[in-house]
Image (spheres, rainbow, N blue to C red):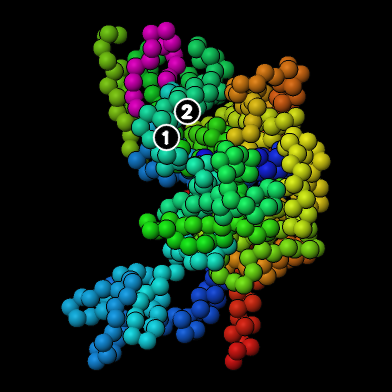
């Protein structure tokens, strides 16, 4: 998501500056601020202990110096610097959304906003007829009927290969091809690892999948129990076009949620289902048109609301 | 440009049919536009225009030159567009040349009128200093920094903004003794003449996707287009230029309809653009 450049008028600029200042002062009052470092800052370390220098640190004239901008973390004897903005760092079990870029022998290669492409093996994917069996040569020739180039797929990280690229699996019913919606790209550090990444927003009839790699899918809700029956009777896609058109009300909700995600990613706030639904509800309450959600006024209002929310949290803690 | 899956393409086309595009805009709405002027201090005039994620920079340099023999009473203007590799990796080296040529020719057609200079948006006669001997040569250079669809509209808006930011230095011309001699010119550093841009048109590109046309397409929407018509309209609602791209043929009635839609949309766009340019000039001071 590239930056939004908004033309703010004078009052909006003043309000935005006030809200940002309040956010900064709230942030600096927490303990995390004390541990933040920039490049070439010395890290306060007790030199008597045998400290292990981890990622993001370096030894300079006997001092432990940070080589990244981030927060200092200490785990027993290990001291390292965790960068706040970094590339996606995959872990086993992460839910990710990716796009197929190549159909290779017995595997699909997916692009997932990482330094290397991920691999989804044919054996890690459920066959259309649902039977568990050994993949034959016929299955290999029919790979294109399952996924083709440019398809958007939801999968889970199964492990790492020797060269560092990812192995994915999509064995459960909730994984697989995503249709009837739009894919958004946000910075990966805005999506924190939670228990749930699949969200079904009932009041909007919308599926929201927050991929840990920064790809977010917003689309019409697909009933995963009904998925199996549609896979068994594979119809040509031409017929489906008129049958399964997305209704207008759902489409409006999808656009609203997508704009809320774009707005939050531009401001730099963590994406979670609560923050997204709150932004959408606020936009409906304020009668903001869907495309005006990306405008200057709603942007300033959202930043102000976040500043107030954090201020009240800090007050509650005291 | 990444590809789109079948499901995403259907969602896009369905959205355009229902008058609700991916970011909530209707078919006839532009993305928010932001204008900055005087971004290149060495140039006589410059502007940077951002239309959503599309970003272009236009600069105008004026040099003294000799008018052509065919048109001794007119100055010269040339437009050149360059697509930077930062916009897309395919523009590196010679990759962007075809697109640059296409954009330059389309802009020249819309802004400069016919070969004789008739119908030009920029009054070429105002550029002449001494008939047949000295005139201003305007070199309009545009750079595409980031591309997310609708390059032609943003380039035209950037050129309009840069022209309103242009100041031509006052020149004192001393005619030589005989008509064959070159006159002496004294270029003033202090006084500047502002350009009159009220006649400069804007370009509105209508992209046909399915049965409907949309204004200001993003690069995803452009990948689904069958054809596109770019209409250049000035403040009085007159058509100054017309360009059609894309392989699919269009019925003449469809073109009529597109032109009338472009006229209607352009009036609003011109007023928004003018207010943005005025705000940019005011904030720059």
Dominant secondary structure, magenta: loop
Determine whether, in the image, residue A247 is placed left or right of residue B109.
right
Residue A79, given in percent of the width and then of the height, sits at: 34, 80
Q: Is residue A133 left or right of residue B120?
A: right
Q: How many marks?
A: 2
Nearer-the-camera pick, A201 or A253: A201
Asked whether the residues under the numbered discs 1 and 2 touch, taking CB atoms below 8 Å apart as contact, a structural biologist would say yes
- Which secondary structure lies at badge 1? helix
Q: Chain of mark 1?
A: B
Q: Magenta span has A21?
A: no
Magenta residues (range): B62-76
Residue found at x 26% / y 12%: B181
Q: Is residue B49 above or below residue A190?
A: above
User: Would you say residue B105 is visible in this rendering?
Assistant: yes
Give the residue drawn at x 70%, y 68%: A278
Residue designated by label 1: B91
Image coordinates of residue A107 in percent, x first then y, are: 51, 47
Q: Residue furthest left?
A: A61
Residue B104 visible, this angle: no
Q: What label sits on residue B99 in the rendered view?
A: 2
Q: Residues within 10 Å of mark 1 (few under 14, many from 20)?
A: some
Q: Position of residue A121 (x, y in %)?
A: 53, 51
Residue A287 image position (x, y, % from top left) = 78, 59
């Amino acid at each position: 998501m590239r930056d939004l450049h908004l033309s703010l008028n004078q009052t909006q600029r003043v309000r935005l500056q006030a809200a940002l200042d309040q956010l900064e002062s709230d942030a600096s009052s927490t303990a995390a601020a004390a541990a933040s470092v920039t490049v070439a800052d010395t890290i306060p370390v007790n030199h008597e202990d045998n400290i292990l220098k981890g990622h993001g640190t370096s030894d300079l004239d006997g001092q432990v110096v940070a080589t990244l901008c981030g927060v200092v973390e200490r785990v027993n004897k290990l001291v390292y610097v965790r960068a706040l903005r970094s590339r996606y760092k995959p872990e086993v079990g992460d839910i990710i959304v990716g796009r197929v870029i190549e159909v290779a022998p017995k595997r699909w290669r997916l692009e997932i906003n990482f330094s290397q492409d991920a691999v989804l093996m044919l054996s890690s994917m459920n066959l259309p007829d649902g039977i568990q069996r050994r993949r034959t040569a016929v299955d290999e020739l029919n790979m294109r009927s399952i996924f083709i180039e440019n398809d958007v797929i939801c999968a889970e990280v199964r492990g790492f290969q020797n060269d560092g690229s990812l192995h994915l699996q999509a064995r459960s019913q909730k994984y697989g091809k995503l249709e009837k919606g739009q894919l958004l790209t946000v910075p990966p550090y805005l999506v924190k690892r939670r228990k749930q990444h699949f969200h079904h927003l009932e009041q909007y009839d919308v599926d929201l999948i927050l991929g840990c790699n920064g790809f977010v899918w917003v689309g019409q809700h697909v009933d995963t129990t009904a998925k199996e029956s549609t896979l068994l009777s594979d119809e040509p896609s031409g017929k489906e076009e008129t049958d399964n058109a997305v209704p207008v009300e759902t489409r409006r909700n999808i656009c609203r949620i997508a704009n809320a995600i774009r707005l939050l990613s531009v401001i730099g706030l963590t994406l979670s289902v609560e923050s997204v639904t709150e932004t959408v509800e606020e936009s409906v309450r304020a009668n903001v048109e869907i495309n005006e959600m990306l405008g200057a006024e709603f942007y300033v209002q959202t930043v102000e609301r976040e500043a107030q929310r954090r201020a009240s949290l800090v007050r509650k803690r005291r | 440009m990444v590809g789109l899956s079948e499901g995403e393409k259907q969602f896009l086309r369905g959205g355009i049919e229902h008058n609700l595009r991916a970011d909530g805009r209707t078919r006839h709405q532009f993305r928010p536009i932001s204008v900055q002027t005087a971004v290149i201090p060495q140039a006589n005039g410059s502007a940077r225009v951002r239309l959503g994620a599309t970003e272009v920079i236009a600069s105008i340099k004026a040099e003294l030159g000799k008018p052509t023999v065919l048109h001794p009473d007119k100055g010269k203007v040339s437009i050149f567009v360059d697509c930077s590799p930062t916009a897309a990796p395919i523009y590196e080296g010679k990759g962007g040349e075809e697109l640059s040529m296409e954009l330059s020719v389309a802009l020249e057609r819309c802004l400069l009128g016919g070969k004789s200079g008739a119908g030009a948006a920029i009054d070429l006669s105002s550029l002449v200093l001494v008939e047949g001997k000295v005139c201003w040569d305007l070199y309009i250079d545009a750079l595409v920094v980031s591309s997310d669809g609708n390059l032609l509209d943003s380039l035209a808006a950037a050129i309009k903004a840069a022209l309103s930011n242009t100041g031509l230095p006052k020149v004192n011309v001393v005619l030589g003794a005989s008509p064959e001699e070159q006159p002496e010119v004294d270029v003033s550093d202090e006084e500047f003449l502002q350009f009159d841009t009220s006649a400069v048109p804007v370009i509105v590109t209508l992209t046909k996707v399915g049965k409907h046309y949309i204004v200001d397409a993003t690069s995803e929407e452009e990948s689904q287009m069958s054809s596109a018509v770019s209409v250049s309209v000035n403040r009085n609602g007159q058509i100054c230029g017309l360009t059609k791209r894309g392989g699919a043929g269009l019925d003449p009635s469809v073109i009529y309809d597109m032109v009338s839609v472009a006229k209607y949309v352009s009036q609003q766009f011109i007023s928004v653009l003018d207010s943005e340019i005025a705000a940019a000039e005011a904030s720059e001071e």
